[in-house]
Image (spheres, rainbow, N blue to C red):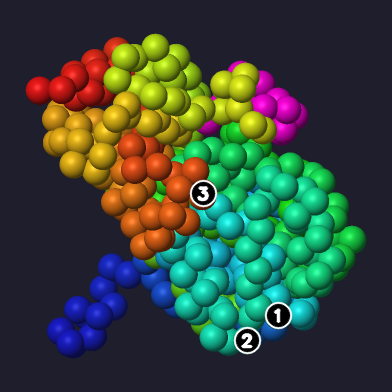
Amino acid sequence: MKFESQVVHAGDRKREHTEAIPSTTPIHLATTYFYETAEQLDRIFGHEEEGPSYSRYDNPTNSALEELTTLLENGHGSLATCGGMTALHIAFQAALLDRPHSIVSSSSIYGATVKLLDQILAPFEVNVTYVDICDLDAVEKAIAAEKPGCVFLESVSNPILRVADIPKIAAIARAAGAAVVVDNTFACPMLMRPLDLGANMVVHSATKYLAGHGDVLGGIIVSDADHHENVRMLSRIAGGTLGPFESYLTMRGIKTLALRYERQCQNARKLAECLAAHPAVERVYYCADPRHPDAATIKQLFAPDLYGAVLAFEIKNADKAKVLGFMNRLKMVVPGTSLGDVHTLLLYPAMASHRDIAPKMRERMGIRENLVRVAVGIEAVQDIYADLDSALRTP
Ligand SMILES: *Cc1c(COP(=O)(O)O)cnc(C)c1O
C-alpha cells in the first residue's frame, strides 16, 4: 500500500482480539459497519438479522445503553436521543402517527415542553389542550371533549412537586384510545415506573438523574411494544440519536444511579425538615410532607421511603431583589439551572424556568416570587444546610 492508503487503512478493522471481552462497553464511534460476508449485511439491511449497519439506525454503544434503560423502566425497547426535548418531540410524533392530532397535556410542565407543544406542534395542526392534571374530573372532561391522540404529563411536577394519579389517568386515556406519554425525569425509575402504571411511553431528560454529573445532554424514550417501532422508525429517518460518547457517559452515570439517588433523597428529606423550622423560611414543598395535597397518591405510587430529591421553599418577605441577594451569598450550592447532578443546584423559577410566564399566571400555578427550587446533591447534608442557612441570614 502507498502512504496515501496506509494513512487511511493501517491498524484499523482488526479481528484478532475479538475473543477478548471489554469489561465496560467501548465507545463505538464508527458510523458504518460491515460483516464477514456481504450476504450477512444484506440480511441486516433486510431486518432478518439484528446488528448495526449505520449509526443513525443502530450503534453498539447506544444499543447497550438502550438495553439498560429498557430494563430500568420495564419497557419493550428504548431510543437514546440527543436531548430530553428531542425525546419528547419524537414521543409525541410516535403517539400521533396513527391517531387524531390532538394532545391533552398537564398545564404544569417544563417550560420548553410548553413551547414544543405551542410553537412547534400546534402550527402543524396539532390541537393542544391544557388541564390541571391533579383534578381527575377536569382530566376526564378534557379527554371526553377533545378525544385526543395523546395524553401527556410529568410524573412529578416542577417546581411545586404535584403528583398525578397516573394509573387512573392512564385508564381513562386508554379507554378513549389515546397514548399516554409520561416525562419521568424528576422521579427517575427508582421512585416510580410509569409503564407499570399504564403509560405507553416514558421520556427522560438523561441530562438529569440518569447521566447525573452535569456533563451530558441526552434523552431517552422507553416504549411499550405498540409504540417502539414507531419511535425507531422516526429516528431511523430523521435522526436525533445520542452520540456514542454521550451514550458511554450516560451508561457510566447510571452505574451509580441507585447510590446517588438514595443519598439525594435522604439529603432532601433532612433538608426539608431543617428548612421547615428555619425562621426565614415561609413554606417548604416536599413529597414527604404529610400535608402534601397528593399525599395519598404519593404513598401509593412512590417506592417506600423515597420521596424524591427535589424540594422547593418560599423565603419569608422576599421579593426578586432579596432572592437574588440570597443566591449571590451561596458559597457551595450552585445557583444554576438543571437538576439531578451530584452537586446541589438551586434554581429561581420566576427568573429561569418560568420566566416567560405572566406573573399572574405564575401565581395561579402556585409559583410565587419568593419560591426557590433545590435539586439536592450527594454532598454532606450538613454542608448543604449550612450554606443555605448562612445565605438566608440577611447580611
Ligand atoms: C430538563 C428537562 C427536559 C428537557 O431535557 P433536555 O435534556 O434539556 O433537552 C424535559 N423535561 C424535564 C422535566 C426536564 O427537567
Mark 2: secondary structure = loop
Span highlighted in magenta in the image: 295-308
Residue under numbered circle 3 = 365
Dot 2 and dot 1 residues touching (CB under 8 Å): yes
Query: Measuring 51% from the left and 27% from the top, which residue is drawn there?
Result: 286
The answer to whether residue 256 is above or below residue 54 is above
Furthest residue in direction left, as rendered: 395
Q: Where does the image place residue 156, in percent across and percent down from the top left?
A: 57, 42
Q: Amino acid at mark 1?
A: His
Q: Ligand 1 closer than 8 Å to the CB at disc 3?
A: no
In the shown orientation, is residue 386 left or right of residue 82?
left
Residue 45 falls within the magenta-colored stretch: no
The quadrant in which residue 125 appears is bottom right
In the shown orientation, is residue 135 left or right of residue 388?
right
Q: CA distance from mark 2 to mark 1?
A: 7 Å
The answer to whether residue 250 is above or below residue 142 is above
Q: CA distance from mark 3 to mark 2?
A: 27 Å
Residue under numbered circle 1 = 101
Q: Nearer the viewer, residue 235 or 93?
A: 93
Dot 1 and dot 3 residues touching (CB under 8 Å): no
The answer to whether residue 116 is above or below residue 164 is below
Q: Amino acid at mark 2?
A: Glu
Q: Nearer the viewer, residue 255 or 122?
A: 122
The answer to whether residue 373 is above or below residue 153 is above
Residue 241 visible at all: no
Residue under numbered circle 2 = 125
Q: CA distance from mark 1 to mark 3?
A: 27 Å
